Structures are given as structure tokens and as C-alpha cells.
Image (cartoon, grey):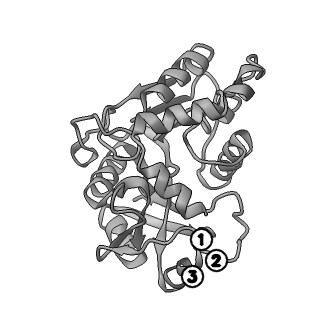
Amino acid sequence: MVKTIRNLYYKLSVKQRFWIRKLVYYPTDLFRDRSTLIPPKGMIYTGSGDFIKIGNSFFNYFKEHGNITPESTVLDIGSGIGRIAIPFTKFLNKNGSYEGFDVVKKGVNWCSKNISSKYPNFSFKYISLKNDLYNTSAENNASNFVFPYEANVFDFAFLISVFTHMLPNDLDNYLNEIIRVLKPNKKCIATFFILDEISSKLMNNSEKNFKYNHGHYSLMSEKVKEANVAYSKDYLISLIESKGFVIEKLHEGNWSGRDKTEITFSTQDILILRKK
């Protein structure tokens, strides 16, 4: 049933997907509490689940593993509609800063209007990059995109459900850019779908089955390639380390049907990286 709905969803245009969600949640959003820093449900495109709870869970994970302080310079790559920016507003002080960018304009606009207006040290940028799940009208590609920041300026960077929508050339370029803008010895935390011997077997009975094998990466759909992308563990580790990162920790998610670990808030696999 889930696979059928997903396949129907992928047949829609990007604009149609957004409009259907807006229509489904219109009755709920009509009577929502507008005084809270929470976007309308019809605008949220960054996955299912409790928007605030998931954002807080990732933020607490970053506090534990990212070596962040209230004065940190933070980069949110794929900032969405502010799911993780919101808990950071209660943490960063005026000497800290938060930079986010995303390929979905409506998410950036909402964050600028509702977050930056109240917290001027939070900035969000719209970057027009082609992605067949979120933005098919753009001409520029992530494979040659240069982050709009100087080198060695960030204390911490993170990507939640971004590399899971990227093909190899895009992944390669983003790793280059992240290593460039991070300060030495600082961390990046990112989520992936990682294929190893266990997950490759388990996924055959899972809702997330990457059955289209392209060697070191696999796809869930050939029609919408960037909807879900998984990478082989050996390839991914080799690539990341070749860029100058140390992999400090891998927390395995349960997307494939793996037993839940202590990191129960993320179905995706989490890698903690440190720039040498």
C-alpha cells in the first residue's frame, strides 16, 4: 500500500505534490495557533512525523556530538522550513550565527519571514538547483555549486535528509564544499541510506527497497531518481575520508528493518565527520 501511494506521488509534478499537501491540511491549518514558531502543516515538505519533536531530537543530538556552543557559527545545508533552526533560536546567543540554504523557495521564504525577522543572526538563502523531487525548473546543478561562504568560517555543519536525495557527482561536490567552509577540527553531521551486508538483505522486506542498483549507489525509483538514494558503505567511507574527514561515529538507522538502536529518532543512518 505504501509503495503504491509513493509511486502515485512520484508521478505528480513538484507543484502538484505541494498543492495536494496544502489541500489535505487546509482544515487543520485554518485553525492553527499562529502565535507559535511552527509552519502550517500544509507547507511542511521535510518528511512525516512530529515536526517539533524531530527537530528537538536532532538538536539535542548535535549538542551531544557536535561540540556546539551558544557562540558557534552553524551551517544548515538543506534548511527546509526551519525544523532544526527553530530549536537553535533558543540556544545561540547574539555572538553565534545560523546560516541555512535550501532549493525550495517557499521554505526559505517562511524561515526568513518568521525566524530571521525575530532573530537577525539567523539567515536563510534560496539556491536554485535542479532536483527531480523538489525543483525541476532550475538550470544549475548541485555538482558544480559553490557554497556562498568563505573558507574556514563554520564551527559546525549538518545535513539532514540531503545526501539521501543526491546522486554521486552532487555528493562529491558537497563534500568538497563542506570541507572548505568548515574550520579545522570542526564537525559535520549528516544522514544517509547506507547499504552494507545487513541492510541490503533486510531492505527486501522493507518499505524502503533500493532495487535499482547502479554499482556504488542504488535508487528506489528510476523515474524520480533523487527521491531516495542509497550508497554502499565501502564506497561512501572511502569517498568521505579522501576529502579530508575523519569518520568519528556511525549510528545506524532502522530504515531497512534493522532493530532500533539508541538513536531512535532517525530512521536514516547518521555519520559524524570531523575535518582534520
Q: Which mark, by number, is residue 252?
A: 1
Q: Secondary structure at mark 2?
A: loop
Residue 268 visible in rendering: no
Mark 3 crowdedness (10 Å alpha carbons): few <14, some 14-19, many ≥20 = some
Separation of marks 2 and 3 at Cα, in angstroms:
7 Å
Seen at 52% across and 50% down, the residue is: 160
Separation of marks 1 and 2 at Cα, in angstroms:
8 Å
Tell me which amino acid carries mark 1. Answer: Glu
Mark 2 crowdedness (10 Å alpha carbons): few <14, some 14-19, many ≥20 = some
- Horizontal side, residue 202 vs residue 246: left or right: right
- Horizontal side, residue 10 vs residue 235: left or right: right
Q: Which residue is tagged 2? A: 258
Q: Can you say which quadrant of the picture contains the N terminus?
A: bottom right
Q: Are marks 1 and 2 in contact (CB under 8 Å)?
A: yes
Seen at 69% across and 77% down, the residue is: 259
Q: Which residue is tagged 3? A: 202
- Horizontal side, residue 70 vs residue 98: left or right: right
Residue 194: x and y in percent read: 47, 71
Q: Quarter of the image holding residue 131?
A: top left
Q: Are marks 1 and 3 in contact (CB under 8 Å)?
A: no
First in residue order: circle 2 vs circle 3? 3
Q: Are marks 2 and 3 in contact (CB under 8 Å)?
A: yes
